[in-house]
Each structure stands twice: as structure tokens, then as C-alpha cells.
Amino acid sequence: MIASSAFMQKRMDSPPFPEKKYKGKFSYPSAVRLLGRILFYDPILSADSTISCASCHSPFNAFAHTDHARSHGIRDSMGMRNAPALFNLSYHPYFMWDGAINHLEMQSLAPITHPGEMGESISHVLAKIRRQALYRHLFADAFSDTSLSIPKILKAIGFFMAGLESNSSRYDSVSAGKTTYTEQERNGYFIFSRHCAQCHVPPLFSNFAFEVNGLPPDPTLRDFGRMKQTQLRRDSLRFKVPSLRNLDFSAPYMHDGRFKTLTEVINHYNTAREATTYVSKELKKNMALSSVQKTDLLSFLLCLNDRSFVFNPSHQYPKNELDSLKKSLGLSAK
Amino acid sequence: MLIFSAYPLNQFQNKVYFRNVFVSVFLLMVFHSANIYSFGILRAQKNNANSIQFVFSAFTDKRDSIQLDVLRFYVSSVQIYSRGKMIAADSSEFYLVDIKDSSKSSFTLRSKMSESFDEVRFCIGIDSTTSTSGAMEGDLNPSHQMYWTWQSGYIFVKLEGYVKKKQFQYHLGGYAFPNRAIQEIQFKIDPDRELRFTFDAHHFFTHIPSGIPSVVMRPGEEAKILMQHFAASMHLEK
């Protein structure tokens, strides 16, 4: 029994977090982060000043876009993909579902300039920001010089996003020895380890690779994923493996948001596919779980939710900080 | 027309050389053949012991059927060689050359050189390490519209205009395998005489490999081919 418990415990030990890929270094990190946070929530980034980053990346949804299969931008234009949740981004080598962006600082350029998202030119964003005394003050605080620039905008937003760290879930508490799983959660953990962990590797719950998971392409969207970037046929229908943390907050699921519930996701992987359907090798066999096992798996997945991250006030709209700044600068509260 | 002259000069010779080059350029502008469309003059002069000025300029021959509206490109990794040995290098500077903007058509390599040089090498494009290093200032600032926003990566060469009234748009780049498109160019220089390098734009536009469309605006096989063709269209006049 003891040996068995030790064996089980070893199987459940969580690997440590890897080294971060993004290591933003600033002389005044708090000021840069505040600037980035204010920019993140400011619709000034969009052409018609109606859409901010937070419009599609809501803090209460783990910075995903709940209840929207695909994100929409200015003038109600509909995008092609589901806005991914934003957390633990410092560990990611690529961004976007197809890995189009190679650095966290450059990521915000894409939605800002996309005609179906914010529809703005980055130069015009800079011009608008330069006209505001609040931003001139924020930039001076953050970068200790009064010149505003596009790279500084991008660095500030990137640094704020890098600070969105989710590592206080129930899974993390168990891994740290602070608590233990229920029997159902433990069963779910072993099912997860057997069927899911090859791609959704702990503790980030993603290997950030691009995989084919058997979803037939939407005939209207004709989104072939990674192939758009590499133009290699072997990358057709490959999408970046998302993290499974905070799933309770970040519905719907998949790159095009076609699944509204986790049950649909599990059923997708549990269902036998046509022999001719190409999938990544890890998914050649369906899970073939019983109803009880599916419930156990779901129970474990819910252990990856991190409420302290989702409801962390330091990630949310900076109302207090803005009010305080505007008051100190003698600016109108609006 | 690329005119490269590199040999040790004293102050008087510098002035004479400078005058000769400008006269040459002026004459070329007036009497240049309609069959050769030249986009740039690369003059590497040893201004003093500590710097070399690279000057790009453009002129058009109105008799030609080529109209160049935009020609901008990145120059990087400039290296100076003497008898096979690198004597000066500048790997940290990236120059955005804009033929249409006189303030952006030249740059100066500052480096102490104790001997004459006989070879210059530089890259057209941005290396992969820099391409994955985030937001940068200076000539790498995304405000210069030489950075793709829908995917990461710099536009190495932006070439737009008309050939026989048909529009072309080439935004060429690509830092990652298998679409790596950066080109290294080497110029061997005979220090005893002036050498002339010509970018034959007529050759470029009339000998583009078959199957290449008039619009290429993403990394890929076509961009790689065009970048190779861009570099190969610069040659040494005999």
C-alpha cells in the first residue's frame, strides 16, 4: 500500500514551471505595467474608439471572450477566430492560434491594425496618445523620458500581458502539497495523464505545439491554421495547443469557438473518427471513456481554474489608479 | 549605377575624387542608356581613417518603361575586409535605405581602419535573431511601415511601381526556415582603380522567373526567389 501510494504520488508530482521566454526588463517596471494596463483597457487603440483589448479579452473570463464563438471588432465586423485566454504568456514561444507572432511585444500590433478588429494604424494611435496629458505623464514615469514612441506602446502592453500569471489553482495547491485531490479528481488526473498530457503538458497545460485535433474545417471560414504562416501542406489544420487552465471562465472552446461546453470538447475526443480523418499521432485513438470516466476527467479539469487570477483586482480596469492620476494632474475625471 | 571606390586618399585626392564622382553621376544621369534602369549609387568613400560613407541614390531614365514609386530596403551586418581578413564590422546597426528620401539614402559606417580595404559585405534584410527580439526603435521601429502586422517579421525590400503601366508590389521578407530570404552581398574591390557596380533594374523586371506574380507581399518561395533576383541584379561593370 505504501509503495503504491508513493508510486501514485510520484506519478502526480508536477514538473516545475520552465524558464520564461519573455523577460522584459525595465528600470521602472511598476510604471511600465500600469501604462500597459491602462492602454489595454483604453479604446483609444481602435479607429472609432469603441474597442479596447479588453473588449475581446475580458479579465473575468481569464482574458478570453466568453459567449462569443469568434471575436468581433469595430463596426460589428466578425473575426475568424475565438479570442484566446491570456495568461502565462511569458512562457509562450508564439502567439495567435497559428503562431503568427513571435514576440509578446509585437503581438498587439496585429489586432490594433487588423481591419476587422481595431482597424487603426499604429502611427495614428501614437498621435492620439501624444495629445493626452495623462499619457505623456505615464510615459515619462515609465520610461523616464518624455518621448512617446510605438515601441514603447508595444513594450508597455506586452509587459502588462506578461504580468498575467496564473499559478494558484487547486492543481497548484495539490502540487505544492497544501491539499489533496478528492478521489474523483485523482481518477480524473490519471485519465488526463493517459489521454491529454502529451499535448497539454503540466504545469502550463500546453506544449505550445501546433496539432491537428480532427476538427473538420468550417466550410465558410476555410481557416487552415498554421499553414497560413508556413505555407506547408503538412501544417494544414494545425492550431496551437491551448492551455487548459481556467476553462471554467473561458468558454467557448477551440480555435473557432464551436464548442460551448467542456462536455462537447470531451465528447469530441471521445468519439471514434473516420479512418481517413488525419489527426496528430497523439490523437489516433479516441479516448473511449465511460460516462463516469468523463465526469472524473471533467472534475480534474476544473482543478485547473484559478479564481485568484481571474478576480485579481490588479489585472482589472484601473479605475482607482486613473482617478488618482487625473486628480493629481488636475485633469477631468472623465 | 553602383560606383564603388575605395582606396586611401589624402585630403586633396578626396576633393578630386568627390568632384569626379559627382561629375560621373551627372553625366550618367544625362546620357544613361534607356536599357539600363539604375536605382542607386553606392559610393563607399574613405572619408577619413574612421568612417566610410555608403550613399544610395536613385535616378530614373524617363525613356524607360519602368516607374519606381517605392524602393526601400534594410542593410545590415556591414563588414569591411582587407586581404580576406575582416577589419571592421557593424553588426548592431540596421539601416533602412529609402531611395526616395534623401535623408534616408545614406549611412556612415564608423570604425577605425588602419589599412585600405578591398572587400565590402553586407546583408539585404534582417537576421532571425533581431526579427524575434521584440519592439525596437530607430530604423527598426514599426512606424516605418517595414514590419508586417498580421505576422511577425520585417519587410526586407519594398519595391512598388509600374512596368509598362502594369502595377507591381513586392514586399519581400522572411526570417524563418523554410522561407528565410536574407541575402548577403559581397563586393571585391580593386584598391587601385575605381569600380562600378550596376543594379540593372531592366534586367530585374524583364527576367523575373516565370510564374512570379506582380504582387508578392508575404514570406514564401516567391519572396525568396525575388530576393535572390534582387541581389543578383547587382553586378560589377567591366
Image: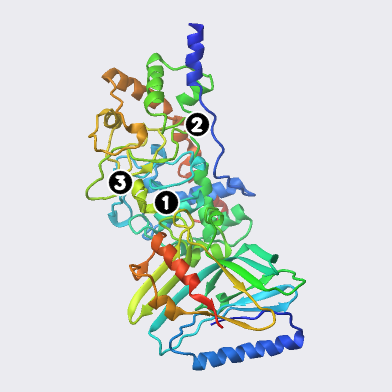
Marks 3/2: CA–CA distance: 27 Å
Q: Secondary structure at mark 1?
A: loop
Marks 3/1: CA–CA distance: 18 Å
Q: Are marks 2 and 1 in contact (CB under 8 Å)?
A: no
Q: Earlier in the sequence, mark 3 or mark 1?
A: 3
Mark 3 chain:
A
**Of tags 3 and 1, which is closer to the observer?**
1
Q: Which residue is mark 2?
A: A167
- Give the residue type that dot 3 points to: Arg
* A124 or A231, nearer to the observer: A231
Marks 2/1: CA–CA distance: 26 Å
Q: Secondary structure at mark 2?
A: loop
**Disc 2 crowd, CA 10 A, few/some/many (<14, 14-19, 20+):** many
Q: Are marks 3 and 2 in contact (CB under 8 Å)?
A: no
Q: Is residue B149 left or right of residue B136?
A: left
Q: Are marks 3 and 1 in contact (CB under 8 Å)?
A: no
- Give the residue type that dot 2 points to: Asn
* A331 or A158, nearer to the observer: A158
Residue A20 seen from this side:
yes
Q: Which residue is mark 1?
A: A100
Residue B190, picture quadrant? bottom right
Give coordinates of residue A283: x percent, y percent. Answer: 33, 32
Q: Which residue is mark 3?
A: A70
- Give the residue type that dot 1 points to: Ala
Q: Earlier in the sequence, mark 3 or mark 2?
A: 3
Residue A311 seen from this side:
no
**Disc 3 crowd, CA 10 A, few/some/many (<14, 14-19, 20+):** many
Q: Secondary structure at mark 3?
A: loop
Give coordinates of residue A215: x percent, y percent. Answer: 28, 39
**Disc 1 crowd, CA 10 A, few/some/many (<14, 14-19, 20+):** many
Rendered position, B135 above or below A175: below
In this rendering, do the residues under marks 3 and 1 share a single chain? yes
